[in-house]
Image (cartoon, rainbow, N blue to C red):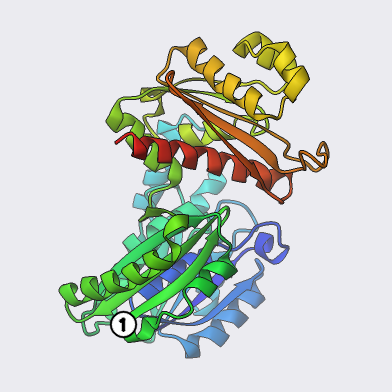
């Protein structure tokens, strides 16, 4: 089966928002064994939307559209699709009541223009939105299918697999293929080097497709096997995974879809360990990532952004003479920060970061991108020193990634 993807919105065409929906839909369609024939973006304009639909319809069995389902004047996708196929619009009372219930539960003020999200082309099949107020819809037009879902990425990522794929599988039955998939996450190696290290593997001969996906600061290798039996799919996938692991082992930190912070959180909970964090150059980013995981209060006792020397001295009891002798960005200071925050909080572990994110502040001895990370458990304090060559924002992300990876490795070694 062939599909086309049409993302709609002025914000996409102006470059203010990146189009992540197309890549997500394409990946999910690929897993189903479907061919993506075309991907296009278009502004919020009636004539332009009709023109793109007219172009894409002969190319594909189904068009997946995202965006333009909100309550504002520039959200015209529903009306544009209806006009393109000569269909009248109608108001769905059950959807309208559902939207009003959401507003009531969230104690939001109802504005009448929200009714717009309950209007659909005649004959549309409603696709529920479990995360927002804008429902999607599907239309059968002379044997071709048009799907429209919201442009909010997290809503697209929920509605496409739950609302769109089941309809397409029903309407376009095909020989059943069993799909086995593995995501291998790496850190500390560039996308180009990942590809270079794997270039001698004949994935096609193994019956597996491979994709390379940079998700800064990580690089992911995604292996997919499609076979006529589940056993065959798993077997071929394992063979391919083994080949990748041999070549990338020292850079691999995860297999699967869990984030690094989710992995660390699970290990801290399992071992019933608590942690406190003292951050300087990362400005709270490590803590932010740790608290992105639900239930983080089980392991995170407190965190301090001790950005200034005075804060390191007064809050963490880092001696001023240590900072004067070795500098705030040093192994000695990082170790004392980790030990100080652990003692202050009374936790099992203390984690610290101190560095130079840039773009200024570096020197020949300590260039921009220098970071010291330390982890203390009361019995020992380990410290790691890295130098990254990115801009300020990316350096901070790299620092936080390296800190969480150090924590993960420590927890693994402790068994």
Q: Is residue 91 above or below residue 38?
A: above
- Res 226 → quadrant: bottom left
Q: Which of 155 and 261 is in front in this view?
A: 261
Q: Is residue 348 above or below residue 371?
A: above
Looking at the image, the residue that sits furthest to the bottom is: 58
Q: In this view, does 43 lie to the left or right of 138?
A: right
Q: Is residue 144 above or below residue 354?
A: below
Q: Nearer the viewer, residue 357 or 301?
A: 357
Position of the N terminus, as image quadrant, is bottom left
Residue at 68% from the left image edge and 29% from the top image edge: 330
Query: Can residue 167 be spotted in the picture?
Result: yes
Residue at 63% from the left image edge and 63% from the top image edge: 9
Residue 345 percent location from the top left of the image: 48, 13
Residue 398 percent location from the top left of the image: 60, 46
Residue 300 percent location from the top left of the image: 43, 24
- Res 18 → quadrant: bottom right
Q: Is mark 1 on a helix, strand or loop?
A: loop
Q: Is residue 111 left or right of residue 198?
A: right
Residue at 33% from the left image edge and 68% from the top image edge: 241
Q: Which of 54 and 236 is in front in this view?
A: 236
Residue at 70% from the left image edge and 17% from the top image edge: 322
Residue at the disc numbered 1: 207
The number of callouts visible is 1
Query: Can residue 91 be spotted in the picture?
Result: no
Q: Nearer the viewer, residue 349 or 95?
A: 349
């Amino acid at each position: 089966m062939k599909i086309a993807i049409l993302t709609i919105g002025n914000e996409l065409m102006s470059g203010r928002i990146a189009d992540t929906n197309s890549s997500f839909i394409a990946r999910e369609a690929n897993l189903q064994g479907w061919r993506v024939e075309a991907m296009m973006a278009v502004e919020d304009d009636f004539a332009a939307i009709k023109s793109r639909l007219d172009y894409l319809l002969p190319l594909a069995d189904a068009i997946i559209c995202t965006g333009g389902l909100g309550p504002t004047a520039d959200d015209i996708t529903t009306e544009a699709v209806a006009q393109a196929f000569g269909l009248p619009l109608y108001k769905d009372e059950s959807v309208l009541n559902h939207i009003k219930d959401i507003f009531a539960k969230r104690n939001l003020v109802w504005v009448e223009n929200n009714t717009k999200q309950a209007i659909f082309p005649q004959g549309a099949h409603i696709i529920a939105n479990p995360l927002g107020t804008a429902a999607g819809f599907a239309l059968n037009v002379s044997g071709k299918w048009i799907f429209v879902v919201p442009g909010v990425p997290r809503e697209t990522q929920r509605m496409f697999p739950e609302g769109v794929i089941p309809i397409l599988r029903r309407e376009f039955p095909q020989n059943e293929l069993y799909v086995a998939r593995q995501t291998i996450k790496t850190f500390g190696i560039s996308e180009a080097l990942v590809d270079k290290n794997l270039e001698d593997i004949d994935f096609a001969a193994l019956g597996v497709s491979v994709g390379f996906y940079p998700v800064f600061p990580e690089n992911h290798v995604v292996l997919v096997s499609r076979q006529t039996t589940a056993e065959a799919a798993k077997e071929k996938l394992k063979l391919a995974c083994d080949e990748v692991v041999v070549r990338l082992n020292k850079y691999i930190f995860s297999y699967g879809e869990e984030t690094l912070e989710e992995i660390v959180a699970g290990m801290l909970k399992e071992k019933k360990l608590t942690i406190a964090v003292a951050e300087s150059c990362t400005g709270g980013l490590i803590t932010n990532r740790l608290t992105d995981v639900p239930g983080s209060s089980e392991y995170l006792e407190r965190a301090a952004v001790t950005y200034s020397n005075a804060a390191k001295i007064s809050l963490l009891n880092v001696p001023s003479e240590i900072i004067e002798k070795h500098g705030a960005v040093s192994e000695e200071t990082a170790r004392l920060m980790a030990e100080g925050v652990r003692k202050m909080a009374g936790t099992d572990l203390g984690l610290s970061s101190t560095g130079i994110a840039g773009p200024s502040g570096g020197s020949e001895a300590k260039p921009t991108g220098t970071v010291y990370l330390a982890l203390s458990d009361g019995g020992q304090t380990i410290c790691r020193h890295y130098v990254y060559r990115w801009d300020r924002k990316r350096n901070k992300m790299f620092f936080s990634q390296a800190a969480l990876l150090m924590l993960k490795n420590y927890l693994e070694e402790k068994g």
